[in-house]
Image (spheres, rainbow, N blue to C red):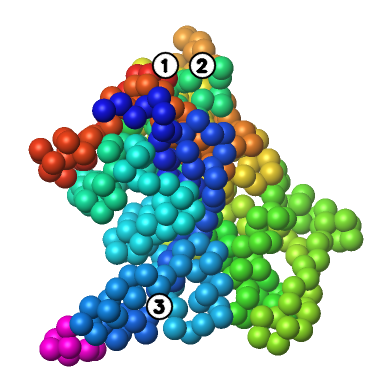
C-alpha cells in the first residue's frame, strides 16, 4: 500500500529543550514546544498505594494517570499553578531517559497538536548522533505497537541539518554540522550522507549552560529578580538580548563608556505577589555566548573553545575529506542563533588553520607551497529548526517511503530492524 501521494509524512524532531513537529513538505514546523511532561502525581500515587485486591479502583486510578497529563507550555503553566503536577523532562543531553514520559509526549503531539491518525501517516523521527541501537528499538516498538504507524524512519539530526540544503542550490551532503541545542552540543562530520562516527566530538556546554551563566551573572550583581523566576528571566534575556562579540575587552570598554546605549532594562511581574519589578541587563549580553569561545569563564571542567573542537574533529577525519569539511561548516540548533556567532566562529577557526599552514611551510623551509584552506561557516535564518526542515525536505521525496521500515517488516523481523536506517540518495 503506497501512502506517499495522498498523505504527507509526519516529521517530529525531539530535542532536549524543544520539540519541533509538523508535516513533510512544509517550510516551518507547525508547533515548537518545550520537551516537558506534567503528570498528575495524585493519580499515580493512588494507583500505587491501593491494595492489590481492589483491582478496579487501582485500574481506574491508573487510567486517570494515563489521561491526566500535559506537555509543553501547558505543562509548565500547570506545574506553576498546581502542586499535584510534577514535571518530567524525558530527554536529557540528547538521549531519552524516561520512556513512559516520552510515549505520553508523542501521544499528545500526534492527537492534540497535529490532530492526525498515526495509522494514516509515515513518521520521520530524529535522534542524536551518539544514540544507542537499543534506544532505536524502543522508539520502533512504541511507534509500531502503541501508535500502529505504517512506516518509520529514524534520521540522525546532523545528517538532516545538512539535508536542509540551505548552503547551496543543490544539497551538499559532505560537511561538518555544529549542532548546539538546549541540552546537548555535537560537532559531527558527514561525508556523502554518512556520519564519520570516530570523529564525532561532544561538548558539555549547550544552551542551558548559557542560561545558567546569565542567571549567575545577574544574581551576583544583585539584580532584583524573584528567585523562582530567575531561570526563566535568564532564558528570555539570552534569547532576546545576547550576542557574540569579536573582542571581549573592547566590548567591556564600550559598555563602560556608553552604558545608556548598551545596557537594556527588563521588566517583569512577580509570580507570587503580582508586584512589578525591573532589572538591568549589562555585560551578560555578550558574556553569555562567550562561554563557547572561552569556556574557562564558566567553569574549570571543560576549557576547550568550540573552534578548537571543530578543528580537532576535522583533523581526525580521513585526509581526503578535510578540505570539503572545512568548506561546509553548517550551524544547527537554537543556541547558534546569537548575532554574529558564525562570523566569530569562522574568524577563530581560520586563524587556527592558517597558523598550521604557516608552521608546516616553515618546517619545510618554504620548499612546498600549500594551497590555502577555505574555511566557510554557513549561517541561515532557519538554522534554529534546520534538523526539522531537513527532515521535511527528505520526507517529501519518493525515496523516503522506500527507505522506511514498514509495519509488515516489523511484524516479521521484530524491533531489531530499527537499529539501522539507510541513507537514501534521493537528495544529491
- Residue 357: give x, y in percent of width and height: 50, 23
Q: Residues within 10 Å of mark 1 (few under 14, many from 20)?
A: few
User: Sequence order check: which comes first, mark 1 or mark 2?
Assistant: 2
Looking at the figure, which quarter contains the C terminus? top left
State how far apart marks 2 and 3 are (Cα).
Answer: 49 Å
In this picture, residue 175 sits left or right of residue 316: right
In this picture, residue 412 sits left or right of residue 369: left
User: Sequence order check: which comes first, mark 2 or mark 3?
Assistant: 3
User: With respect to residue 187, does 205 lie above or below?
Assistant: below
Please tell me which residue is depicted at 47% across the width and 49% down the height of the picture. Answer: 114
**Magenta stretch: includes residue 53:** yes
Looking at the figure, which quarter contains the N terminus? top left
Q: Which residue is mark 1?
A: 428
Answer whether labels 1 and 2 touch (C-beta < 8 Å): yes
Please tell me which residue is depicted at 46% across the width and 50% down the height of the picture. Answer: 115
- Residue 284: give x, y in percent of width and height: 69, 61
Q: Secondary structure at mark 3?
A: strand
In this picture, residue 128 sits left or right of residue 217: left
Q: Secondary structure at mark 1?
A: loop
Q: Nearer the viewer, mark 2 or mark 3?
A: 3
State how far apart marks 1 and 2 are (Cα).
Answer: 7 Å
- Residue 359: give x, y in percent of width and height: 50, 25
Q: Which residue is mark 3?
A: 40
- Residue closer to the observer: 296 or 142: 142
Answer whether labels 2 and 3 touch (C-beta < 8 Å): no
Please tell me which residue is depicted at 76% across the width and 63% down the height of the picture. Answer: 282
Q: Nearer the viewer, mark 1 or mark 3?
A: 3
Amino acid at each position: 500500500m503506497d501512502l506517499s501521494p495522498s498523505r504527507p509524512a509526519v516529521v517530529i524532531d525531539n530535542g532536549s529543550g524543544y520539540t519541533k513537529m509538523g508535516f513533510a513538505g512544509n517550510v516551518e514546523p507547525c508547533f515548537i514546544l518545550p520537551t516537558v511532561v506534567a503528570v498528575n502525581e495524585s493519580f499515580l500515587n493512588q494507583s500505587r498505594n491501593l491494595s492489590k485486591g481492589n483491582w478496579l479502583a487501582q485500574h481506574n486510578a491508573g487510567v486517570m494517570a494515563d489521561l491526566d497529563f500535559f506537555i509543553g507550555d501547558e505543562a509548565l503553566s500547570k506545574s506553576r499553578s498546581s502542586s499535584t503536577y510534577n514535571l518530567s523532562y524525558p530527554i536529557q543531553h540528547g538521549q531519552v531517559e524516561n520512556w513512559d514520559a516520552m510515549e505520553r509526549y508523542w501521544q499528545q503531539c500526534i492527537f492534540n497538536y497535529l490532530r492526525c491518525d498515526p495509522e494514516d501517516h509515515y513518521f520521520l523521527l530524529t535522534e542524536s548522533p551518539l544514540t544507542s541501537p537499543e534506544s532505536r528499538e524502543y522508539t520502533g516498538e512504541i511507534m509500531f505497537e502503541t501508535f500502529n504507524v505504517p512506516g518509520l524512519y529514524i534520521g540522525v539530526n546532523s545528517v538532516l541539518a545538512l539535508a536542509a540544503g540551505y548552503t547551496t542550490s543543490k544539497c551538499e551532503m559532505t560537511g561538518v554540522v555544529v549542532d548546539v541545542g538546549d541540552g546537548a552540543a555535537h560537532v559531527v562530520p558527514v561525508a556523502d550522507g554518512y556520519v564519520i562516527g570516530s570523529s564525532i566530538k561532544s561538548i558539555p556546554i549547550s544552551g542551558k549552560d548559557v542560561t545558567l551563566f546569565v542567571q549567575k551573572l545577574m544574581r551576583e550583581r544583585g539584580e532584583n529578580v524573584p528567585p523562582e523566576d530567575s531561570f526563566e528571566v535568564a532564558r528570555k534575556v539570552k534569547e532576546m538580548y545576547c550576542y557574540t562579540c569579536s573582542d571581549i575587552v573592547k566590548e567591556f570598554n564600550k559598555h563602560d563608556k556608553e552604558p545608556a546605549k548598551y545596557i537594556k532594562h527588563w521588566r517583569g511581574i512577580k509570580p507570587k505577589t503580582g508586584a512589578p519589578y525591573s532589572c538591568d541587563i549589562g555585560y551578560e549580553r555578550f558574556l553569555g555566548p562567550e562561554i563557547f569561545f572561552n569556556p574557562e569563564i564558566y567553569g574549570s571542567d571543560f576549557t576547550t573553545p568550540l573552534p578548537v573542537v571543530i578543528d580537532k574533529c576535522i583533523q581526525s577525519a580521513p585526509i581526503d575529506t578535510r578540505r570539503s569539511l572545512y568548506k561546509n561548516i553548517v550551524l544547527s540548533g537554537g543556541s547558534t542563533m546569537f548575532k554574529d556567532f558564525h562570523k566569530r566562529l569562522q574568524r577563530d577557526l581560520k586563524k587556527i588553520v592558517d597558523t598550521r599552514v604557516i608552521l608546516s611551510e616553515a618546517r619545510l623551509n618554504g620548499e612546498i607551497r600549500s594551497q590555502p584552506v577555505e574555511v566557510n561557516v554557513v549561517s541561515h535564518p532557519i538554522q534554529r529548526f534546520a534538523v526539522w526542515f531537513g527532515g521535511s525536505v527528505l520526507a517529501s521525496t519518493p525515496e523516503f517511503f522506500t527507505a522506511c521500515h514498514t509495519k509488515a517488516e516489523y511484524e516479521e523481523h521484530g524491533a531489531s530492524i530499527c537499529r539501522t536506517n539507510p541513507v537514501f540518495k534521493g537528495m544529491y
